Image: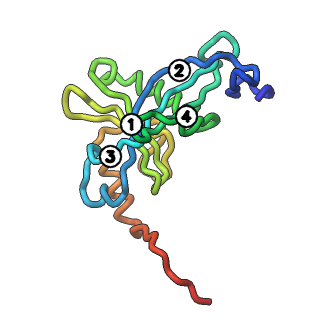
Amino acid sequence: PASSKYAFTTEAAGGGRPDISLPHQVFVLNPEQIRAGAGLDSATPTSWRYLLNQDSSGLLADSATATAEVMDQDGAHVFSNVQHGWMANAMRRAVGIAQKIPTVQNGAFEFRVLRIPAVRIDSIWLKNTAAAGDLLVPIRSAIPTLSAFQAYSGDDFLSKLREFLDKQEPFDNSPRLVYR
């Protein structure tokens, strides 16, 4: 970690105490739900995540970033994981983009993350709490028509996702014998 001023290090390893911010819930949506016409509200909450910034040089822009995730287990929050590196930095970049959207600045939005693991897409999900019109900003995307760091309306996001899924074979995870 000492080789990069952007590396996140624990206090035990000599790093500074991180600034914990932006608590948000993480949701997962299954591609089969999307194919069946389900909307964003069908997503299932799975965990809570926090953004960790660790000042490396006195400027937040030069800070290391990580995310910490906790899961609900029998009514208690239990530590799940810490993630740092490109994904945590991409998350911070997407947050910056989302904060600059005029609709977000003038509206009432709840910050969430939407994961669709089967198609390798993670997005910031800005849930509009005052009216219709959720917004999504992909953090990463393996879908050519959904670019990372670009804002999409909820309807446009789901439309592009359905279009992509309609061209794919449904995933079958059932066990089967393979003969050679």
Name the residue at 41% across, 22% down: 99
Q: Which residue is mark 2?
A: 20
N-term-proximal mark, 4 vs 2: 2
Q: Nearer the viewer, mark 4 or mark 2?
A: 2
Q: Nearer the viewer, mark 2 or mark 1?
A: 1
Location of the C terminus (image quadrant): bottom right
State the residue lying farthest toward the right: 3
Instruction: Determine whether, in the image, residue 62 is placed left or right of residue 137.
Output: right
Between 19 and 154, the residue placed more toward the observer is: 19
N-term-proximal mark, 3 vs 1: 3
Question: Would you call the spot at circle 3 few (<14 residues within 10 Å), some (14-19), or many (20 or more)?
Answer: some
Q: Which residue is mark 4?
A: 90
Q: Which residue is mark 3?
A: 43
N-term-proximal mark, 4 vs 1: 1
Residue 105 position, x and y percent, is 33, 19
Residue 103 position, x and y percent, is 30, 24
N-term-proximal mark, 2 vs 1: 2
- Depicted 177 relative to depicted 21: above or below: below
Q: Which residue is mark 1?
A: 75
What's the amino acid at mark 3? Ala
N-term-proximal mark, 4 vs 3: 3
Kind of element beneath mark 4: helix
Q: CA distance from mark 3 to mark 1?
A: 20 Å
N-term-proximal mark, 2 vs 3: 2
Dots 2, 1 in contact, CB < 8 A: no
